[in-house]
Image (cartoon, rainbow, N blue to C red):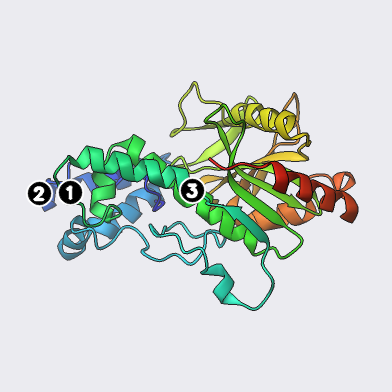
Amino acid sequence: MSDSPLSPSPYEVLGVSATVPHEELRRAYRRLLRATHPDTGGSAARFQEVQRAWELIGDPEDRARYDRGESGYDADVADGGDGSTGFSATFHPTRSQARGSSVRARSYGHPGGRARERYLALMREWVGRGTELDDPYEPSLVRSAPREIRQLLAEALAEEATARAVTSLGMGFTIWSDVAVHPRSEAKLDHVVLGPAGLFAIRSADWGGEVKLAKGDVVGAGIDREEEPFHALLRDAKTFSRQVGVKFTGLIIVVPDDALAVPYDRIERGRLAGSLLVRRSLLPLVLRNGANAAGRESVDRAFELRSRLQESIRFV
């Protein structure tokens, strides 16, 4: 069970309310164990999810800690590029730089900044005027918030994790985050990344569960049927390209490692051919090597693109 802000609580996984007596909780757990066990035709992933939920709240003391918000989320995940499923509610922009003496990639903008601003505004509105909100990231508060509020926090954390992964690549790379698509539009690109392998438009996403490619786009239980993530990214990338006068080498959607059953998947046909759905831990490798070796930029061309982008990019 992922520790994304959008992940179902262990109570939701077990199909009970948070106030259910312990014996009823135990019965629900045993019933689901039988129903989800792979030997009886169940799903291995669902079976593991049920076990993880029980680990969090199966013991009365553990349950009390969870209900107080003392467990369930990793309070200080070091970076999002190691495959971890926890999250840190506080962005540490200098944390990755402190890990070594190597030169970091150039980084501009505030990754996840707009999503965090909207999260804080909606959280305060939801809690109610006049209510003291000591910690808007307190885990039990986050868990109890409506999905649209938790979605904003998940977006912010995903964008911050991608930015940390890219800055570790070194001085040959430049990342711009929360980039305005057009002066008269509120649309944005989460990240524009320039490196030796080309220029990439990247969306950082966390839908709180598993996703996959199907019928030329990303689908999953947490994605609305009307939502077409890659088509939306293509539309915004084209608008930005016309505005700035550049051409993207490729489009990438980055998701938490446990959200994708394979390291990466590629769209093979149509207008989105070559677009990649990638596990976060694999993103640095993809950006180093590129999706197409023939598309690698020369040093002079990369310098020209960087100068043009630096002069033209505006942030949301």
Residue at the spot 52% in from the left edge and 51% down from the top edge: 110
> Circle 1 is placed at which residue position?
25
Nearer the observer: mark 1 or 3; the answer is: 3
Looking at marks 1 and 3 on the same chain, the residue that comes earlier in the sequence is marked by 1
Please name the amino acid that badge 1 sits on: Leu
Secondary structure under badge 3? loop
**How many angstroms separate mark 2 from mark 1 (CA)?**
6 Å
- For the residues labelled 2 and 1, say whether their Cβ atoms are less than 8 Å apart: yes
- For the residues labelled 3 and 2, say whether their Cβ atoms are less than 8 Å apart: no
> Circle 3 is placed at which residue position?
112
Looking at marks 3 and 2 on the same chain, the residue that comes earlier in the sequence is marked by 2
Secondary structure under badge 2? loop
Q: Position of residue 225 (x, y in %)?
A: 48, 23
Residue at the spot 61% in from the left edge and 41% down from the top edge: 314
Please name the amino acid that badge 2 sits on: Pro
Secondary structure under badge 1? helix
Residue nearest the viewer, comparing 94 with 250:
94
